[in-house]
Image (cartoon, helix red, strand yellow):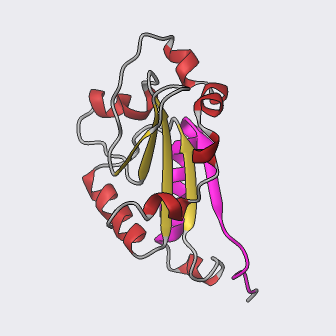
Amino acid sequence: GMDYSDYSLYVTGHSLGGALAQLFAFAIAGTKRAQSFLPKGKPIIAVTYASPEVGNKGYQTYFNELEKNDQVRHLRVSNKGDLVPFGLGLLVPGYKQPGVNIHVVGEEKEPDIAYDRTKIAFAFANPLDMHSPNTYRNRLPNHIIEKSAEDFYSDFDL
C-alpha cells in the first residue's frame, strides 16, 4: 500500500458535526483494518467545538485506552453559556466526554483546561450566541489556537 507516514489525520466539527467528528476519530482509531492506511505512529486528532456528549462510561474508558496508546487525541472546545456540550448529560445521566476540554470563559480570561470532564458553567447570555461558531472563534485566545494537541496532552498524566 501507499506510505502515509508524512501525513496527519485531523477531523473537526461544530455541534452535531463535533459529535460526528469525535465518533469518527474513535471508530477509525479503534479499527484494525484502518491501521493499513493511517499515518504510522501518529494519533488521529479530533478538534471539536460545542460537541454534545456522545457516549457512556464504557465509551469513555475505551477512548481513554486509545489515547494512552497514542492512537487518538481529542480537543473539545466548550464555551461558557453554551448548553450543548453538557446538556445531554444533564437530561440523560451517564453520558461522558473524553479528551481535553478547553472551556472558554470569556475574551479576557484564560480558558479552563481539564482532562476527561466537561466544565458546566451557566452564563447570563443568549445561549444561541454562545453556541455560534463565530463566538467560539472570537473568544479563543491566539496562544491557545497555536498549541498542538500534544502540547495540551503533555499537561496530563494518561
Task: Identify the residue at image location x=51%, y=11%.
Answer: 126
Compared across the picture, whether 77 is left or right of 123 comes to: right
Task: Identify the residue at image location x=65%, y=66%.
Answer: 9
Where is residue 82 shown, x and y percent of the image? 46, 24
Where is residue 80 shown, x and y percent of the image? 44, 26
Task: Identify the residue at image location x=27%, y=58%.
Answer: 58
Q: Which residues are magenta?
A: 3-30
Q: Nearer the viewer, residue 43 or 96?
A: 43
Say if the magenta span includes residue 122.
Answer: no
Q: Nearer the viewer, residue 139 or 86?
A: 139
Q: Residue furthest front?
A: 108
Is 78 above or below relative to 76?
Answer: above
Compared across the picture, whether 36 is left or right of 115 comes to: right
Q: Residue furthest bottom?
A: 1
Q: Residue furthest right?
A: 2
Task: Identify the residue at image location x=42%, y=45%.
Answer: 101
Q: Which quarter of the picture shows residue 119?
A: top left
Is 134 above or below relative to 52?
Answer: above
Where is residue 74 shown, x and y percent of the image? 49, 56
Q: Quadrant of the N terminus?
A: bottom right
Say if the magenta span includes residue 7.
Answer: yes
Compared across the picture, whether 30 is left or right of 89 comes to: right
Is 4 above or below relative to 13?
Answer: below
Q: Quadrant of the C terminus?
A: bottom left
Q: Residue furthest left?
A: 93
Where is residue 49 shown, x and y percent of the image? 55, 39
The number of discs equals: 0
Q: Nearer the viewer, residue 109 or 148?
A: 109
Is 143 above or below relative to 84?
Answer: below
